[in-house]
Image: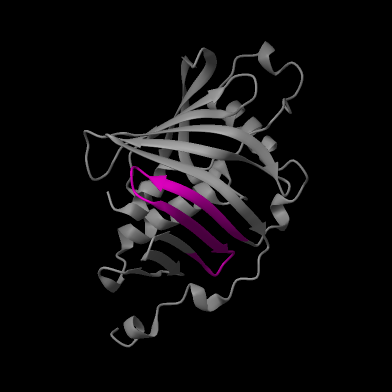
Amino acid sequence: MRKLLLLTAAVTLFLSAGCNCPCGLFTKKENADDVFANMQKAIDVSGKQKTIKSALIVYDTHLGKKEQSKITLKVKDKIGIRLEIRSGKSLAVRACSDKKGWEYTTAKGLRMLNAKEIRELKLEASYLSPNIKFDRLFASAKLDGSQKINGVDNWKLICYPYAKFKLSSITMFVDKKTYLVSKSIEANSKNQDEDIITYYGDYEEYNGIVMPFMMVAQVGSRILEFKLISADWNAEIADSEFAVPEALGKSK
């Protein structure tokens, strides 16, 4: 799996730092819709979500034994998505605007993204966006019992992305008391024998949105560590950052 697609493992699923669920919630039988509804309520702790039209989110990361890298996500409502990874002197960028997408890497230069790669980028951005909507992100989900994660009871949710994404189901483990996502498991599209397993921790409110500040993903023998550095809602982002570069635009 290419370096950019490894970020898919860093699914940013926002949960409450405390219990914001309605009293009496645990007196009835839980289902997937109930879990998602409470997760969604816990995201927006200050009523900001509907006002967010753009976001600039930065992570520091250690990709296995490689030197420290920085991952930057830029999202602008109805304009585009841009995902950047800088590691030393290397740069990798994936971006899309409307139905056109492109990629630039230091090693290989510029190229256009195909339709599948654009769908993958859009799904990654949906995971990481501060105004994530679970009912729009997944076509369906089912509650598959519960499981202990580090001694804590968690709901086990099997989530099915929309068919257009052509991706396998994603399993999430959600703390029964806090609705904090403890762990997620996703199939590796490049190697079926290597699941992408991600652990989440250090949840805090950041500018009105609750996010995990630390994430650790395991892909086979590789370990990826992510630390949230900054998140700027309604950031000033030029439309040109999402547009197809001139060199590629002329070739089409």
Q: How is the image coloured?
A: one colour
Instruction: State the residue at coordinates (31%, 71%).
Output: 112
Instruction: State the residue at coordinates (35%, 83%).
Output: 249
Does residue 28 appear to the left or right of 117 in the view shown? right
Q: Quick one: 219 or 128, which is closer to the camera?
A: 219
In this rendering, is residue 61 above or below 85?
above
Q: Quick one: 189 or 203, which is closer to the camera?
A: 203
Query: For residue 103, which quarter of the picture?
Result: bottom left
Query: For residue 106, which quarter of the picture?
Result: bottom left
Point out residue 84 in the picture as x, y percentages from the top left corner.
Answer: 44, 62
Point out residue 5 in the picture as x, y percentages from the top left corner.
Answer: 35, 51
Q: Quick one: 3 or 125, which is closer to the camera?
A: 3
- The question of residue 71 being in magenta is answered with yes
Count of numbered badges drawn on the protein: 0
The residue segment tinted magenta is 55-81
Instruction: State the residue at coordinates (29%, 65%).
Output: 114
Q: Quick one: 20 or 30, which is closer to the camera?
A: 20
Main SS category, magenta section:
strand
In this rendering, is residue 213 above or below 240?
above
In this rendering, is residue 227 above or below 70?
above
Point out residue 34 in the picture as x, y percentages from the top left corner.
Answer: 61, 27
Residue 139 in view in this figure: yes
Instruction: State the residue at coordinates (60%, 33%).
Output: 202
Residue 171 in view in this figure: no
Query: For residue 111, which quarter of the picture?
Result: bottom left
Does residue 76 appear to the left or right of 183 in the view shown? right
In this rendering, is residue 186 above or below 109?
above
Point out residue 79 in the picture as x, y percentages from the top left corner.
Answer: 54, 70
